[in-house]
Amino acid sequence: MAIELTDELIQLERAAWAEQQDNRLTVNTAAAVQAAVTAHAQATGQSRYEVETALKRRVRHPEG
């Protein structure tokens, strides 16, 4: 089963990844991503771990 990701999740992770690359990731940004991932996983019946992994792969390695 493919992991479904929303545009909101992708946007949040992109913002967090940009902050992390600039060495300025805040607790608030990281917490927002984690809360959104958890809520999405619960709402869709998917594994939180698998949602987070797919999200990071999509944002950090879009070519693969």
Image: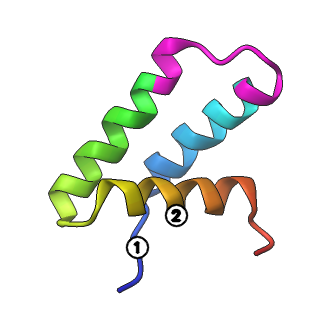
Give the residue pinned by disc 2: 54
Q: As drawn, is 15 to the left or to the right of 20?
A: left
Residue under the image location 40 percent in, 73 percent down: 3
**Residue farthest to the bottom?**
1
**Residue farthest to the front?**
49
Quarter of the figure with the C terminus:
bottom right
**Helix, strand or loop under label 2:** helix
Q: As drawn, is 24 to the left or to the right of 43?
A: right
Residue under the image location 25 percent in, 66 percent down: 46
Quarter of the figure with the N terminus:
bottom left
Q: In whole angstroms, how far apart are the C-alphas of marks 2 and 1?
A: 7 Å
Of the residues under marks 2 and 1, which one precedes in the sequence? 1
Residue under the image location 50 percent in, 13 percent down: 27
In terms of image quadrants, where is residue 4?
Answer: bottom left
- Residue type at mark 1 is Ile
- Colour treatment of the image: rainbow
Please state which of residues 16 and 7 is positioned toward the viewer in this rendering. 16
- Residue type at mark 2 is Ala
Few, some or many C-alpha atoms within 10 Å of disc 2 (few <14, some 14-19, many ≥20)?
some
- Region of the chain picked out in magenta, as a range: 20-30
Against 32, residue 60 (above or below) is: below
**Helix, strand or loop under label 1:** loop
Please state which of residues 9 and 26 is positioned toward the viewer in this rendering. 26
Few, some or many C-alpha atoms within 10 Å of disc 1 (few <14, some 14-19, many ≥20)?
some
Q: As drawn, is 53 to the left or to the right of 16?
A: left
Give the residue pinned by disc 1: 3
Decide: marks 2, 1 in contact (CB < 8 A)? Answer: yes
Please state which of residues 32 and 6 is positioned toward the viewer in this rendering. 32
